[in-house]
Image (cartoon, rainbow, N blue to C red):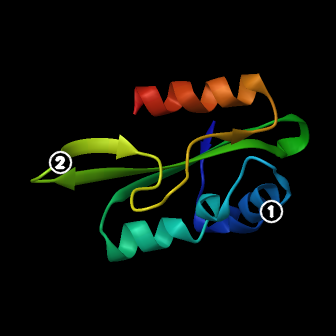
Amino acid sequence: MTQATDQDRDDWQRFVAGHPQATFFHRSGWQPLLRDVFRHNTYFLYAEGEGGRIEGVLPLAHVKSLLFGSALTSLPFAVYGGVAADNEAAAQLLEQEAGRL
């Protein structure tokens, strides 16, 4: 389980572009927007398989609001989000790490 950094963008983008469950909202470009513009802590998680290949992604942001409280959510302000994974093991790892956060 790894938290994506700016250096991981290309690998993240390749995975999202080729995955049938991934949407426009899974793109890595949302991370700096949520972090730098909206000032939310972000946790763009990915699971790696053999050879360091990404097998699943889960973009998350910690939203703090006087109106809605404090919540860890997959892609606030977006229509779609959640886990996009090649297999159930990767999906479970991502969901477990989100629960831990």
Q: Residues within 10 Å of mark 1 (few under 14, many from 20)?
A: some
Residue situated in front as seen by the camera: 42 or 75: 75
Mark 1 residue element: helix
**Residue placed furthest toward the bottom:** 37
Q: Which residue is mark 1?
A: 17
Q: Is residue 86 above or below residue 30?
A: above
Mark 2 residue element: loop
Q: Residue at x 43, y 55 (%)?
A: 42
Q: Earlier in the sequence, mark 1 or mark 2?
A: 1
Please state the horizontal and vertical placement of residue 96, each as a whole percent of the image.
Answer: 53, 24
Q: Which residue is mark 2?
A: 68
Q: Is residue 74 above or below residue 101?
A: below
Mark 1: amino acid:
Ala
**Residue placed furthest toward the front:** 79
Mark 1–mark 2 distance (CA, rounded to whole Å)? 32 Å
Residue situated in front as seen by the camera: 51 or 89: 89
Q: Residue at x 67, y 30 (%)?
A: 91
Would you say 10 lies left or right of 91 here?
right
Mark 2: amino acid:
Phe
Please state the horizontal and vertical placement of residue 87, each as a whole percent of the image.
Answer: 80, 29
Pointers 1 and 2 in contact (CB under 8 A)? no
Please state the horizontal and vertical placement of residue 86, each as a whole percent of the image.
Answer: 81, 36
Q: Residues within 10 Å of mark 2 (few under 14, many from 20)?
A: few
Q: Quadrant of the C terminus?
A: top left
Would you say 50 lies left or right of 99 here?
right
Q: Indicate the quadrant where residue 29 lies.
A: bottom right
Would you say 52 lies left or right of 69 here?
right
Q: Quadrant of the N terminus?
A: top right
Would you say 80 lies left or right of 37 here?
right
Q: Is residue 66 above or below residue 25?
A: above
Please state the horizontal and vertical placement of residue 11, each as a whole percent of the image.
Answer: 78, 60
**Residue placed furthest toward the left:** 66
